[in-house]
Image: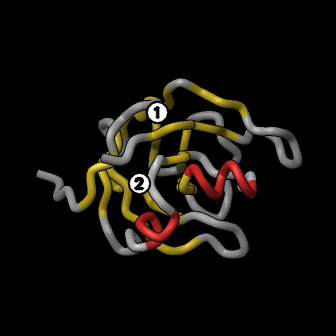
Amino acid sequence: MARVSSILIYPDQDQPGQALHSSFVSPDGLDGDRRKKSPVHLVAVEDYVDLHPRANLVVDLPSAELDALVGRRLRIGSTELEVTARAGNCPGLYASVPVPGDVTVGDELTVGVITD
């Protein structure tokens, strides 16, 4: 079972990220995060440790399994994400936020959830 291992925001360009225990995720992205190419950037913990991409949600899932989630819907905490594409020139995936909600470190990532 995959879980969120880190939550990060990057309020200021070219500055280090800020680690959070939890965050509200709106259709625009995580509260306090600078707007980027996509509302949410997910990355596997192995890629975050090795390459330090500017991801918002780091999950303890192997990279290959994470990459297979393009086009899928995920529930993390009380939010739902629609994985839209692989990130351009860095590891991870981009996602939109059809159902806003809260995400906390340790939340389980569930694949294929259909909203009521």
Binning the other alpha carbons within 10 Å of mark 1 as few (below 14), some (14 to 19) or many (20 upward) gives some
Residue at 51% x, 37% y: name it: 5
Q: What element carries label 2?
A: strand
To which quarter of the image does residue 96 belong? bottom left
Where residue 97 is drawn, which disc sits there? 2
Where residue 83 is drawn, which disc sits there? none
Residue at 45% x, 64% y: name it: 66
- Contact between labelled residues 1 and 2, with CB atoms less than 8 Å apart: no
Residue at 30% x, 47% y: name it: 1
Q: How many marks?
A: 2
Binning the other alpha carbons within 10 Å of mark 2 as few (below 14), some (14 to 19) or many (20 upward) gives many
Q: What residue type is labelled 1?
A: Phe
Q: Which of marks 2 and 1 is nearer the N terminus?
A: 1
Going by the image, does 41 lie left or right of 11? left
To which quarter of the image does residue 72 belong? bottom left
Coordinates of residue 48 in the picture (x, y in percent):
66, 51
Coordinates of residue 33 in the picture (x, y in percent):
65, 41
Residue 29 visible: yes
Residue found at the very far top of the displayed protein:
21
Coordinates of residue 19 in the picture (x, y in percent):
66, 30
| Vertical order, 56 against 96 (above or below) | above
Q: Is mark 1 on a helix, strand or loop?
A: strand
| Vertical order, 18 against 36 (above or below) | above
Coordinates of residue 78 in the picture (x, y in percent):
30, 37
Q: Which amino acid does label 2 sit on?
A: Val
Q: Which residue is disc 1 drawn over?
A: 24
| Vertical order, 4 against 55 (above or below) | above
Residue at 17% x, 58% y: name it: 114
Residue 79 visible: no
